[in-house]
Image (spheres, grey):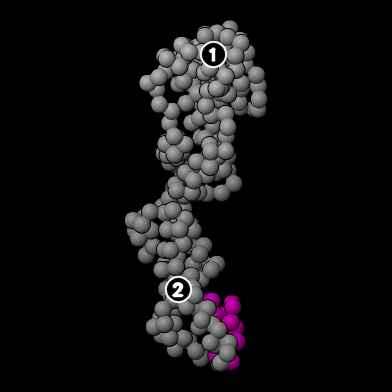
Amino acid sequence: MHVTDLEKLTRNLYALRLDGLYAANIDIEVLSKHGIRVGTDVWNEELFEIKEESKRSRAFRKGLDLLKCKSFTRAQMIDKLVNFLGNLDDLEISCDFLDKKDQFKNAVRGFKSASNEEVADEVVERLKEIRMIDDVGYAKNCAQELFENKFLAAERVMQELLIRGIAVDVVCNMIDDVTPEPTGQIFKFLKKKYPDWGKDFKVERRAIEALERLGYDWETIEESLRKFKDDFA
C-alpha cells in the first residue's frame, strides 16, 4: 500500500492515507521510527503494528503530561490512561478503509488489538522503569503530608493510602518509618484546632469526637489528654 498523504492534525498526530484512502491517525514518533512518509510503501502487517504502537505512544505521552503537574500511584495512572484511551475515537483503523481493503483484513486476521487496560499497564511499567512513578516514594510523601497537615492517626493514613491504590505490602512496610508519636500528634491538633480545650466541657467533648474521627482510639486519646491536660489549664 502506497502512502499518498500525511495530514498534520496536531503537534504529534498525523492522518495517514494509503492508496488515497484515510487509514488511521498515527503518532509522529511511530511514523519517524518506521520511516513512513509520502511516497513510501506500507505492508499490511506494518499498518496494524504502527497503529498499535501509536496507541502506546499516545498513552505514554499522556502519562508524561499528567506527571508534569502532580504525582500519581500506579493504580491512579492506569485509571487515568484507560479513561484517556476510552475517550479517543480514532484508535482503530478506519472502517471505510477496512471496507475497501479486503486484502488488509485477510492479512491481519490473526492479529489481536491490545485492550486499553493492557496498553495502560504496559505504559505504566515503562514509566516505573524511568522512575516517573514510584509507589513507595509516593506513599511516604503522602503519609507525611497527612500526618503533618491533617493530624490523622496511623490507621486512617493507611486507609487513605489504600484508597489511592497503594498496595497493602507497600503501605505496611513503610508506615512505621513515617508514623509520628500519637501523643504529640494529638497535642498539635488540639493546640491548633481547639485552643480552649480544658477550659470548656463542650469544647472538650467536640475535641474528643474530632480525634475519634481522625482515627485515634479512646485509650490513646484518654492517655494523651491525661499527660498534658495541665498545659491547657
Horizontal and vertical percent for residue 208? 50, 83
The local secondary structure at tag 1 comes to helix
Mark carried by residue 215: 2
The local secondary structure at tag 2 comes to loop
Horizontal and vertical percent for residue 203? 58, 87
Query: What is the count of numbered marks?
Result: 2
Name the mark nearer the viewer: 2 or 1.
Answer: 1
Quadrant in the picture for residue 90: top right
- Residue 123 inside the magenta-drawn segment: no
Give amino acid for label 1: Lys
Q: Which residues are magenta?
A: 187-200
| Between 62 and 134, the one nearer to me in the picture | 62
Identity of the residue furthest to the front in this view = 99
Residue depicted at x 35% and y 60%: 172
* Vertical arrangement, residue 193 with respect to residue 126, above or below: below
Quadrant in the picture for residue 232: bottom right
Horizontal and vertical percent for residue 194? 58, 82
* Vertical arrangement, residue 2 with respect to residue 227, above or below: above
Horizontal and vertical percent for residue 144? 48, 62
| Between 54 and 140, the one nearer to me in the picture | 54
Using the rendered image of the protein, determine whether residue 126 is visible from the camera's viewpoint. Answer: no
| Between 155 and 2, the one nearer to me in the picture | 2
Name the residue that disc number 1 marks: 100
> Gap in Å between the C-alphas at discs 2 and 1?
64 Å
Using the rendered image of the protein, determine whether residue 204 is visible from the camera's viewpoint. Answer: yes
Give amino acid for label 2: Gly
- Residue 190 inside the magenta-drawn segment: yes
Residue depicted at x 52% and y 78%: 210
> Alpha-carbon neighbours of circle 1 within 10 Å: few (<14), some, or many (≥20)?
few
Residue depicted at x 42% and y 18%: 108
The quadrant in which the C terminus is found is bottom right
